[in-house]
Image (cartoon, rainbow, N blue to C red):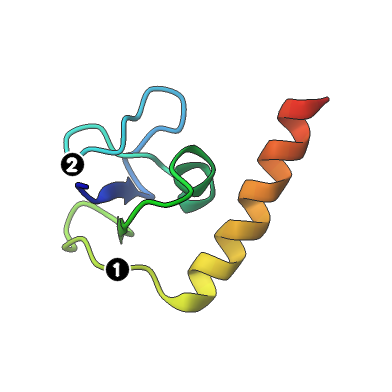
Amino acid sequence: MAPIHVDEATGSDESGKGTPEAPYQSLAFALYTHPDGAFQIRKDASTPYDEPTQSALKKAKKGADGIEKKKKK
């Protein structure tokens, strides 16, 4: 499976697809959309993609749970 890409500066949770050309903006949305994915994240276009830290994944998991609760309402 190809890694899911997240670019916090130029990505989009609405139109993103998780590809390098169309990354998601938030790790939480990427985790909600692809719960079993391997993620690559970067803060801005001048830095390379890298694996998220464990603390970032933990925070994103809470955010993904919040997104799921909102969708169920």
- Label number found at residue 16: none
Residue 69 point in image, percent of width and height: 77, 38
Residue 28 point in image, percent of width and height: 54, 50
Kindly give the residue lying farthest to the bottom in the view shown: 54
Neighbour class for label 2 at 10 Å: few (<14), some, many (≥20)? some
Q: Residue at x 48, y 37 (%)?
A: 33
| Above or below for 24 versus 72 | below
Q: Residue at x 72, y 27 (%)?
A: 71
Residue 10 point in image, percent of width and height: 31, 40
Q: Which residue is mark 2?
A: 20
* Residue 42 in which image quadrant: bottom left
Q: Residue at x 31, y 30 (%)?
A: 17
Q: Quadrant of the C terminus?
A: top right
Which three-letter amino acid code belongs to the residue tagged 2? Pro
Residue 2 point in image, percent of width and height: 19, 47
Which three-letter amino acid code belongs to the residue tagged 1? Glu
Kindly report the distance in space between the C-alpha atoms of the residues bearing marks 2 and 1. Answer: 14 Å
Instruction: Name the side, left or right, on which 51 lies relative to 69.
Output: left
Neighbour class for label 1 at 10 Å: few (<14), some, many (≥20)? some
Q: Nearer the viewer, residue 72 or 8?
A: 72
Q: Which residue is mark 1?
A: 51
Instruction: Name the side, left or right, on which 55 lies relative to 7.
Output: right
Q: Nearer the viewer, residue 37 or 61?
A: 37
